[in-house]
Image (cartoon, rainbow, N blue to C red):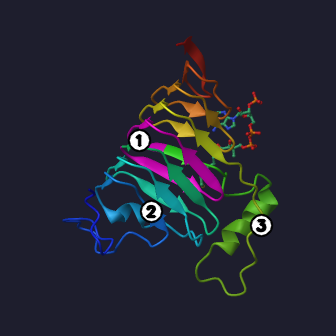
Amino acid sequence: MSNVLADRRVENDWWKEPVPENVSWGEGFYLETAQSFRFMRSKLPMAITFGEHVSCYAGCSFALGKNGSCSVGDFSLLNGVMIMAEERIEIGKHVLISWNVGIADSDFHPIEAAKRRQDTMALAPFLKDAPPRPEIRSRPVKICDNAWIGMNAVILKGVTIGENSIVGAGAVVSKSVPPNVVVAGNPAVIVKEL
Ligand SMILES: CC(C)(COP(=O)(O)OP(=O)(O)OC[C@H]1O[C@@H](n2cnc3c(N)ncnc32)[C@H](O)[C@@H]1OP(=O)(O)O)[C@@H](O)C(=O)NCCC(=O)NCCS
């Protein structure tokens, strides 16, 4: 059972578009609105996979670049997460993600000012002969099973959140977190062992 219908539209949705073809889900998937895929640009054949009994509420957004992919394990609950994947963001099983959480596997713009300047021009919609976008490295992100990410937290490129660990509200996580700890603050540090 799922509230996504056979034509890939969500039951009673206010958003008229269907769920993109390269998104798959398991038994018991709940999706509040297909609007969550409005920034979805991935061209991969299996770009997003949701496991069984995943819940995905209206605050969620999947902003995937053309080579981006994301997987969400069984029984994970996504309340309002912005997933920004140029490469890969993996969310395990029984993970809780709260409101207004950002998870990104890239910085999306270069560090060097000259390249960033080029990037602003590359991204100007009406500029004639715009330069190409400079190359930007991505680093996959992984949220392991049973993790809990508090509201307004930000998880940056290359980070793994270990099994059972908790990220406190408002934390900015720039380095990987081991299993069975609580992290909080900006930059996030371990505040408790579980
Ligand atoms: C600021 C930023 C661009 C720096 O990237 P970077 O130069 O690769 O930085 P690094 O990952 O090498 O981190 C350098 C140090 O700063 C810390 N750090 C990095 N970003 C941080 C952040 N946002 N908040 C707090 N500390 C941060 C790192 O922990 C590291 O600390 P250390 O010196 O003790 O080891 C990046 O971390 C960031 O915040 N990216 C998000 C950009 C964004 O919002 N993009 C959205 C689309 S516009």
Find residue 137 and report its horizontal and vertical position in percent: 76, 55
SS state under label 2: strand
| Coordinates of residue 130 in the picture (x, y in percent) | 71, 81
The span from disc 1 to disc 2 (Cα, nearest Å) is 15 Å
Question: Where is mark 3, residue-wise?
Answer: 134
Query: Which residue is disc 1 drawn over?
Result: 76
Residue at (64% x, 66% y) in the render:
67
Amino acid type at circle 2 is Ser
Give yes or no for residue 144 being in the magenta stretch. no
Amino acid on which disc 1 is placed: Ser
Mark 2 sits on what residue?
24
Left or right: residue 25 compared with residue 172: left
Local secondary structure at mark 3: loop
Q: Label 1 crowding class (10 Å Cα cut-off): few <14, some 14-19, many 20+?
A: many
The quarter of the picture where residue 47 lies is bottom right
Ligand 1 closer than 8 Å to label 1 CB: no
